[in-house]
Image (cartoon, grey):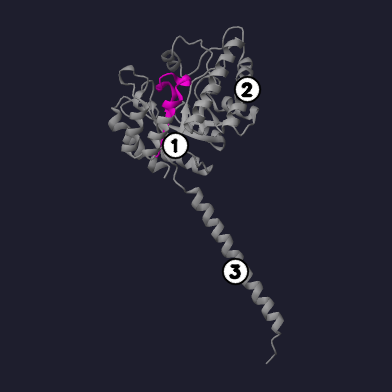
Amino acid sequence: MAQVDRRAFIAGSVAALAGVSATGCATQKASASERKSRRPNRIAVATYSFWQFKDDRKMPIEQCIDEAARMGFDAVDILLRQIEGEENVDNAYLQKLKRHALINGLDLCSLSTHQGFVLSDAAKRQENIDKTIKQIEVAYRLGVPIVRLNTGRWGTSGSFDELMANRGIEPVLPGYTEEDGFKWVIDSIEKCLPKAEECGVILGLENHWGLARTPEGLLRIVNAIKSPWLQVLLDTGNFLEDPYDKLEMCAPQTVFMQAKTYYGGGLWYTLDLDYERIGRIMKKHNYQGYVSLEFEGNEDWHTAIPKGLALLRKAFG
């Protein structure tokens, strides 16, 4: 019987154990990665869902927080127009809201604001820049990490109802071009970014009509600026035709998602959105952020909002 070389045996054994260990570590790492990609998204509710700009039922943010907690949401997405004074609101009130959310176990995850930069008048653009900077400061004082940003519109539609009747399309202001509009928007957002970075607040540019009505327009602005403090806020209900390919185009740069539902028929239109499919799209791109329910239907919110929560829990669980 051949004598075993003791040193060779030990060396071989160590190598084998190292191989097993490395394989085990790789398996553990892969499993951890898979677990991360399967983590359920946290589900928020937009305070807009309780109000929908209907004057007879404008609800204080505190009450929205109470309802969100009762229904079992994880977070609240605040519409700034529901706060008296908007960007000029008293700081003591903001701290009261922050405390109220905390004791109800809810995150304040986004601040949806309004502004417009598609303006030929440089002074008016500056007014909107200054307004947006104040809004970023409001988000900072609330501890909110994301501000919803709009490009603004040309203003050539007689009303929002008319804009919706035209599927979100409106003519360019006479004497100007879309190129002018994109330059105004990009220059204006760039002037807001130093404050966003200072406050640690990400600006989420929404596909909310105007120059961000299409994924091409939205991504043109975001990619031109190339800042970690400007990302996409993706609204599932604002691509009115062939939404799934458009949502997927935007998914890799999405930092926040607002998910429309239309129980009882939509206020302006109704989209038959397949949230199982949308959930798969976002998981494919490893979207880990919040999904905020925006109910925009005619059914009573007391029944419609819990239905939306169940729908989103299933699709993004």
Work out whether residue 278 can be spotted: yes
Q: Residues within 10 Å of mark 1 (few under 14, many from 20)?
A: many
Q: Which residue is mark 1?
A: 291
Say whether disc 2 or disc 1 marks the residue closer to the N-terminus.
2
Name the spot of residue 158 as percent of width and height, x first.
45, 9
Query: SS class of the residue under badge 1?
Result: strand
Name the spot of residue 125 as percent of width and height, x first.
58, 14
Q: Residues within 10 Å of mark 3 (few under 14, many from 20)?
A: few
Q: Quadrant of the C terminus?
A: top left
Q: Amino acid at mark 1?
A: Val
Q: Which mark is residue 20?
A: 3
Bounds of the magenta span?
73-94
Q: Amino acid at mark 3?
A: Val
Query: SS class of the residue under badge 3?
Result: helix
Which of these two is toward me, 186 or 316? Answer: 186
User: Extreme bottom residue here?
Assistant: 1
Which of these two is toward me, 246 or 185? Answer: 185
Work out whether residue 150 can be spotted: no
Q: Quadrant of the N terminus?
A: bottom right
- In-image side of 236 versus 188 (left or right): left
- In-image side of 48 versus 209 (left or right): left
Name the spot of residue 77 as percent of width and height, x first.
43, 31
